[in-house]
Amino acid sequence: MKIIKNISVRHKLMLISMAITMASLLLASVAFITSDRLYAQKTVVDGLNTMTDMIAANSSAAILFGDADAALETLGFLKSQGNIQAGALYLKDGDVFATYRRNGFNGELPAPGSNKQDVKFSDKYTEVFRPIVYKNDPIGIVYLRSDMSAVHDRLSWFLWIVVITLVTSLVFAFALSTQLQRIITDPLLRLSAIARRISTEKNFDLRVSGHGRDELGNLIGDFNTMLNEIQTRDRQLKEHQAELEERVAIRTQELEIANIELASSKEQAEAVAKRMEYHAHHDALTGLPNRILLNDRIHKGLAHARRQQSMLALLFLDLDRFKIINDSLGHAVGDQLLRVISRRLKSCLREGDTIARLGGDEFMVLLPDIKSASDAGKIGNKIIKSLTDSISCNGHELHITTSVGISVYPFDGADADTLVKHADISMYRAKDIGRNRMVYYTAEMNAGSRKKLALETSLRSALGKKQLHLVYQPKIDITRNQIIGVEALLRWKHPAMGYVSPLEFIPIAEESGLIIPIGEWVLNTAFRQLREWHDAGFDELTMAVNLSSAQLSRPGFEDIMEHALSNSGISADKAELEITENVAMRNIDSAIMTLQKFKDKGMSIAMDDFGTGYSSLGYLRKLPIDTVKIDRSFVSELPDSKDDALIAQTIIAMAHSMNLGLVVEGVENVRQLNFFKKQGCHIVQGFLFSKPLLADELLEMLRTHDTRAIINLVRK
Ligand code: C2E
Ligand code: MG
Ligand code: MG
């Protein structure tokens, strides 16, 4: 079966047609031979029956009369029948009456079985028995035996014919099928040949030719239709491919152009990047390295110093009173000044040292390789000296100094942050002790700043924990013998440290921004308190509140003030705001604007601690102030100190000439009081009259007119 599967369709078809031919021929031959044999057998039997009938009729008389000769004569007729081998007549009891044997036949004659008609077949002969009847009585039996060889001969003849026919048919079928199978195989072969060519050549233009209306024709037709479809798709695919390739080519071209443009703009970009890199690491105003570049150099310098076990120093510089120059003469002058200073500072340094501007008026010098700590001091002094010559800017001859703090690796810190912090602390120390000087860092300074930090932490919760309260120091008009107002002063009672001086915690509050909520609380509390005293009948009393610069420059501060006033219900002319010179100078333009608004509302403005700051008549004129408070530092040595007396007199004269009110603070004794009385000052504040008091104590004082005793002092 496997072999048949693998042979070609052509041979399969040939085999099928030959097999069918053979099978049909064989069937036909078998049918024919079988029917012919049966017919021949029947013919023989019919012949034998006719003959027995005839013999029976002709021999009945001979039997009845026992005439054997007549019987032999009747049987003699059998000689003319070539196929009869033997014949016999039996009597009723089975005895042989007469027999006939053809020459050459020596076979035994059978005994008659019965009187019945009987036919027996064998391969070689056929036997017939027939009863002889006379008047319905059986009187004997006729027996005939016919030779069947003629039938066999005929059969073998037919077989031969069948074999020859089969062989001829086979040859004929083979010849015919080889031709006829082409009707089927030719289109199939064409189909497969075209399919194979298409698959190898990828040529979809090929088609299978000639097709009829039969199934094969339909198959070829469908195949060609399929090819048409494939060809259309192939064409579309090629078109798409071409379109795609075109697009890729255009894109490639665009990319090449873009690449060229990029290459040319790369140079520009590099130049821009360089500029950006420069700006990222340098101060725009002075061209000096900025904090970022400095930090980088400090880290590198430290790494080097660690490896070489050498020393490194940081000098923190802050220009003294630069802000005032900047605010008063304008930013253009300030900027010019900074540029000149930068050049001077730079000239003090060696190659390899770095001077950076950190912002505003702060500079930092990095000395990456020094032999001893005193080398840093030498550079520090050189820097301070370099600024002694005045600088002319826009027609102004300006004198500027700087305070310098120094920290040295490895003594004052092992890392950049610590060294910077310590240089910063020592710079503040330089400022504290008089400015225009240089201070080396010491461990004690750090202890101070740690305390500051601890205070700041506690101060954050002081308001919430109700550790803050106000005390009120009266201001007395010595000519009228009357308390005309009070100044609200803040007190902080720390649970562990006790009372902390406002001189200590107010700067911390200012630096940390805590002064904003604290200041708002002071305003509200002081004004509410004043309202209570007004309600108690002392309705002419004024309330002075100290303001910090952070409050003044805070957007929305006017609303806070408005709120405090309206909440308390006091009228604005009973409120006085005390600012120090430094507060006013910090941002003079906006300070003027804000203060003017308060003044317009009816509040009065006092310049506190006058003489300790940047005491300039020019500024005083610009600021919308009503009163000047002479600082107690000029008061304490009076009247003995001639210098202080002169200063006090000058301030008083100036205030008078400008029509400003005057308050003398810190009056502790009668001599001081008399001094100012002689100068025409009549509003005083000081321990001589009263220390700052709690609200109840002050009310008590107001009620008892306790100041009379003091007035008596004045008279003395
Ligand atoms: P200030 O505004 O000049 O207040 C006057 C200071 O002088 C008060 O010190 C007061 O107790 C003190 N004083 C008054 N009379 C005498 C005297 O006869 N002899 C001496 N030696 N001192 C006298 P205090 O209360 O320690 O306040 C110090 C500074 O703290 C104030 O100076 C003020 O600038 C600031 N301050 C106080 N309370 C506040 C506040 O609520 N807000 C703001 N921003 N600053 C405040
Ligand atoms: Mg004050
Ligand atoms: Mg004061």
Image: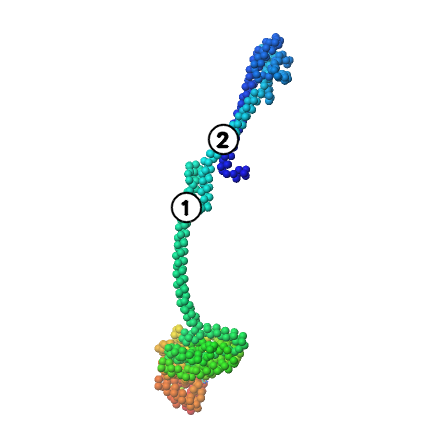
- Tell me if mark 2 has few (under 14), some (14-19) or many (20+) residues whose alpha carbon lies within 10 angstroms of its own: some
Measured as percent of width and height from the top left, residue 504 is found at 47, 80
In this rendering, does residue 438 appear at all? no
Closer to us: 335 or 238: 238
Q: Quadrant of the N terminus?
A: top right
- Tell me if mark 1 has few (under 14), some (14-19) or many (20+) residues whose alpha carbon lies within 10 angstroms of its own: some
Q: What kind of colouring is applied to the model shown? A: rainbow
Closer to us: 268 or 10: 10
Measured as percent of width and height from the top left, residue 250 is found at 39, 57
Disc 2 marks a residue whose amino acid type is: Phe
Residue that badge 2 annotates: 172
Label 2, ligand 1: CB separation under 8 Å = no
Label 1, ligand 1: CB separation under 8 Å = no
Closer to us: 322 or 311: 311
Measured as percent of width and height from the top left, residue 229 is found at 41, 45
Judged from the image, the secondary structure of the residue bearing numbered disc 2 is helix
Measured as percent of width and height from the top left, residue 543 is found at 41, 80
Q: CA separation, marks 2 and 1?
A: 45 Å
Residue that badge 1 annotates: 231
Q: Nearer the viewer, mark 2 or mark 1?
A: 2
Quarter residue 608 falls in: bottom left
Above or below: residue 94 compared with residue 295: above
Total labels: the figure holds: 2
Which residue is located at x 52 percent, y 74 percent? 303
Which residue is located at x 49 percent, y 32 percent? 175
- Mark 2 or 1, nearer chain start: 2
Disc 1 marks a residue whose amino acid type is: Gln
Which residue is located at x 54 percent, y 26 percent? 160
In this rendering, does residue 549 appear at all? yes
Closer to us: 644 or 558: 644
